Image (spheres, rainbow, N blue to C red):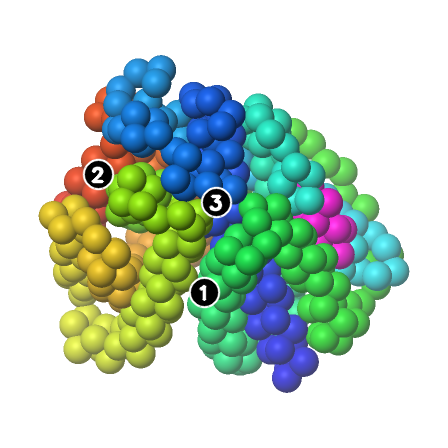
């Protein structure tokens, strides 16, 4: 059990480290560079991303907030939204296929181990290629392939948890895995920041690829060897089996309310986290060059994102400690979830009304705490809204699709909002609307 506990904790940490580095830093930074090059001259682009800040013209900086073909912000947001939506669609399909194939794998190494190792390799190779791509279409295609590798790595690992960990030890290993995920999120951002600042835009891709490779190897070496699956019965695959994952529960109004609430809050959170690099560079530090700073824009942007990662970690740890006692004192999770949503909107209001590095860090601290509570109480609401205990596993797997739905919503809403207004300040009120809508849906649920 100790080896399993360490194996799943290490696996959770090592799989989330490169994911955080790619999503919050490397991917948006590369898209920003590619989009900038497309809407500006080569000289201005080199000045913006290679350190020659004095060479960047004020007219180009002013185009960050314009609407139309010359709007840099619009190009950034639309390009990132396209890449994210492609990734979400590919990930959903890959999860169904990999889950079915993994269940039917019959080899001496077991059902899950070959997929975990292969997932680490595929993720690493595709990440290395992604960092070299210089156009949005190629980035979208390669990001989809990275999603396939990541699914191959994480889905069999989750299945191994349910198969190999006895019920009496699950709370202990769930805690270890949760701590690993929180630490991995912050560690991934810090590693990405160090790579961008000291090594350039390709370095975080190389570092992420190396960690992906280790993430597919280290856990299977730490935990006890998986039993052979050669003797398991052969089960044929069919299209019906693949589509079964996407079959929604019937006659389950409360379940759909929980699903909608989770999708909306995921969209609200995604509107700021997904576009964080752009918010920092085009809103918080927009006048960096025109004020005479010669350092690359990556320096202040990375410093801000690193500080926010630390603040989010502190807030999440605080939520983890307080969620249990508060849940025992207030038994109805609806009210706890609504209060947490309101607290998250207060956090969003800080950078919306006073955009600065300090307000962004305060937002990360309060928002990390609030979302930690939302996540905990939202899971309780989802469990209580399950229509049939006999299909709880399937229904919870379908419920988890709400995170992907929310991510796609955030990408679309963010791209449309930035394209219409020409700036990233619109993301904060849009996020507030999504989170408050989630609170309204939550309070309408029956206990």
Secondary structure of residue under mark 1? helix
Q: Which mark is residue 383?
A: none
Secondary structure of residue under mark 2? loop
- Gap in angstroms between the C-alphas marked 3 and 2: 26 Å
Whichever of callouts 3 and 2 sits on the residue coming sooner in the sequence is 3
Q: Residue at x 51, y 42 (%)?
A: 50
Q: Which mark is residue 425?
A: 2
Please identify the dominant SS of the magenta region: helix
Magenta part of the chain: 116-126
Task: Decide whether residue 118 is among the magenta residues.
Answer: yes
Residue 157 horizontal side relative to residue 368, left or right: right
Q: Nearer the viewer, residue 185 or 390?
A: 185
Whichever of callouts 1 and 3 sits on the residue coming sooner in the sequence is 3
Q: Is residue 342 visible?
A: no
Residue 27 horizontal side relative to residue 379, left or right: right
Quadrant occupied by the C terminus: bottom left
- Gap in angstroms between the C-alphas marked 1 and 3: 26 Å
How many dots with numbers? 3
Image height of 61 relative to 1, above or below: above
Image height of 45 relative to 127, above or below: above
Q: Is residue 300 visible?
A: yes
Residue corresponding to mark 1? 186
How far across and how far down the image is residue 226, in percent? 77, 68
Q: Residue at x 35, y 15 (%)?
A: 69
Whichever of callouts 2 and 1 sits on the residue coming sooner in the sequence is 1
């Amino acid at each position: 059990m100790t080896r399993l506990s360490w194996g799943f904790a290490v696996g959770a940490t090592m799989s989330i480290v490169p994911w955080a580095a790619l999503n919050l830093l490397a991917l948006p930074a590369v898209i920003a560079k590619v989009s900038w090059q497309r809407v500006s001259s080569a000289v201005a682009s080199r000045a913006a991303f290679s350190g020659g800040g004095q060479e960047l013209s004020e007219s180009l900086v002013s185009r960050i907030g314009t609407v139309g073909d010359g709007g840099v912000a619009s190009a950034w947001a639309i390009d990132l939204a396209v890449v994210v939506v492609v990734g979400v669609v590919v990930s959903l399909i890959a999860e169904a296929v990999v889950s079915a194939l993994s269940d039917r794998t019959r080899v001496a190494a077991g059902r899950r181990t070959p997929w975990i190792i292969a997932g680490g390799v595929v993720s690493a190779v595709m990440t290395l290629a992604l960092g070299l791509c210089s156009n949005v279409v190629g980035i979208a295609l390669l990001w989809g392939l990275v999603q396939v590798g990541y699914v191959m790595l994480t889905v069999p690992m989750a299945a191994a948890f349910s198969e190999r960990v006895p019920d009496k030890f699950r709370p202990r290993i769930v805690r270890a895995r949760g701590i690993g995920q929180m630490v991995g999120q912050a560690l991934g951002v810090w590693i990405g920041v160090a790579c961008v600042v000291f090594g350039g835009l390709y370095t975080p891709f190389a570092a992420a690829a190396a960690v992906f490779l280790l993430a597919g190897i280290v856990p299977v070496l730490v935990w006890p060897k998986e039993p052979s699956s050669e003797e398991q019965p052969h089960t044929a695959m069919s299209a019906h089996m693949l589509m079964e994952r996407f079959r929604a529960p019937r006659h389950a109004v409360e379940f759909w309310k929980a699903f909608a609430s989770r999708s909306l809050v995921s969209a609200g959170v995604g509107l700021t986290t997904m576009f964080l690099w752009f918010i920092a560079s085009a809103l918080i530090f927009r006048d960096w060059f025109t004020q005479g700073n010669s350092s690359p824009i990556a320096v202040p942007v990375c410093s801000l994102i690193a500080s926010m990662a630390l603040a989010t970690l502190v807030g999440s740890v605080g939520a983890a400690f307080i969620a249990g006692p508060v849940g025992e004192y207030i038994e109805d999770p609806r009210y706890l979830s609504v209060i947490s949503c309101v607290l998250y909107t207060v956090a969003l209001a800080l950078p919306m009304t006073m955009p600065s590095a300090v307000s962004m860090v305060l937002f990360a601290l309060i928002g990390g705490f609030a979302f930690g509570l939302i996540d905990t109480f939202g899971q309780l609401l989802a469990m209580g809204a399950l229509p049939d205990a006999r299909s709880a596993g399937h229904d919870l797997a379908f419920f988890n699709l709400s995170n992907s739905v929310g991510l796609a919503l955030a990408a679309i809403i963010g791209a449309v909002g930035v394209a219409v207004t020409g700036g990233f300040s619109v993301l904060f009120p849009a996020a507030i609307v999504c989170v408050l809508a989630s609170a309204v849906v939550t309070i309408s649920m029956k206990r």
